[in-house]
Amino acid sequence: MKDYPVKKNQRIIVSIIDLTHEGMGVAKVDGYPLFIENSLPGEEVEVLVVKVGNKFGFAKVEKWLTESPDRQPIEHIDLLRTGIAPLSHLSYEKQLEFKQEQVQNVMKKIAKMPEVPVYETLGMDEPSGYRNKAQIPVRRVAGELTTGFYRKNSHQIIPIEDFYIQDPDIDKAIVTIRNILRRFDVRAYDEESHKGMLRHIIVRRGHYTHEIMVILVTRKEKFFKGELIAETINKEIPEVVSVIQNINEEKTNVILGKENRVLFGKDHMVDQLLGHTFRISPQSFYQVNTPQAEVLYQTAIDFADLKKSDVVIDAYSGIGTIGISLADKVKDVYGVEVTPEAIIDAQINAEKNHVENAHYQTGKAEVVMKKWHERGIKPTVIIVDPPRKGLAESFIQSAAEMSPEKVVYISCNPATLARDVKLFQELGYKTEKVQPVDLFPQSYHVETVTLLTKIENN
């Protein structure tokens, strides 16, 4: 058996020398790394070793011997235990610096582009209560239906009512809905036995409109008194304009099933972004921090430096938020998205906003773009906003073949961004600048906007 410099359940005093990209403190014992939650560089702490692995171990703080000047009071220790707000112990100014450094690191190490300027992270004046969407698991705890969040790396639920980073009206709504469901004796889902009815409560609230959509994710289609429950929710929360039952019969960690039923009101809700009105369906992607999404998209529009003659492809267009926001500045916008419901929303949103030069199509971006290319559509700007896994190599090749003057890349994962800009460079595109934007204060996630320009003679 390998001998490590630390043993499980050992108490030791260590100095924190760094933070991981997930915001855990790093200490080293004879070169062996220990990752420690709720600790910051410069702190000396007494820790209990909880796990020892081949390359690194985990420990938890028992006592702080010295505290960092960058430490801020934690609103609620459960915010760290669940991973809801893993950076909530670090001052907001330092969170923004930490995120800028994360982006600089990947641009240097993965993209091999240390010369590309990475600007200071654009933050919020009030970095709490910002989330316009909550996805809350429902389980039976101490004999009753309970809402909260999972302890990190487990499926053990910790009851929570104040989520700190969510719109406070969403937090209140979840408690009200939970109490209504208790009154109606709705059974909470049990994942081990795959029994019980209610799996998740999802609440979305329009930042500007204050409209609320409630999605009740159930294990089966038959929902006893579902309509009455929905009406009661609307009676007690008048801002609710839509209550949807989403049916997910699978034994899975995936939250939403494919089928939706309207129990009350509309099949969508409405909000505004950059002065435009958007219809949002249950499965549609919509950035969870509306004020910072406006900063993010405005940065992308500014980086694109658009002209009236420009033709823009909005890849991963979702419900059309970016394309519709810039349509009045260009000749044409072509949007593509794999989710059919999102494309229906995008088409309706274009109509709602009196935008006639935005055209939307369902499908995989690289496949649809190839067809557009064959039809002679020549984009001058391609805007991409992919999920965390980044862009497929085939997409990058399709984009480069269309030979736009600029690519504006909105990313929620610096590592895949860095990987992708490296490939764009091989295909004749120079990375000019990167702007981090903090859409998720108190967490380690960071969004970025990157400008790439076509290198002449390519």
Image: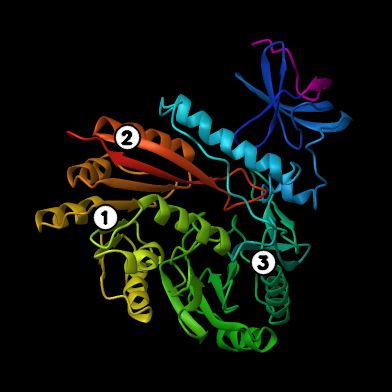
Mark 1 / mark 3, whichever is N-terminal: 3
Q: Can I make out residue 224 in this image?
A: no
Label 2 amino acid?
A: Lys
Quickly name the residue at label 2: 430
Given residues 201 and 327, the one toward you in this image is 327
Mark 1 / mark 2, whichever is N-terminal: 1
Q: Determine which of the numbered discs, if any, sits on residue 312 in the image.
A: none
The reply, left or right, for residue 454 in relation to residue 55 is: left
- What's the residue at 39%, 52% (across, down)? 385
Quickly name the residue at label 3: 167
Q: CA distance from mark 1 to mark 2?
A: 25 Å
Could you tell me residue 113's position as x and y percent?
41, 27
Q: CA distance from mark 1 to mark 3?
A: 34 Å
State which region is magenta: 1-15
- What's the residue at 80%, 52% (across, down)? 76
Q: Secondary structure at mark 1?
A: loop
Mark 2 / mark 3, whichever is N-terminal: 3
Could you say which quadrant of the image residue 345 lies in? bottom left
Could you tell me residue 122's position as x and y percent?
58, 49
Q: Secondary structure at mark 3?
A: loop
Where 50 sits versus 433, above or below? above
The reply, left or right, for residue 84 in relation to residue 319 is: right
Q: CA distance from mark 2 to mark 3?
A: 39 Å
Q: Secondary structure at mark 2?
A: strand
Where 310 sits versus 68, above or below? below
Quickly name the residue at label 1: 364
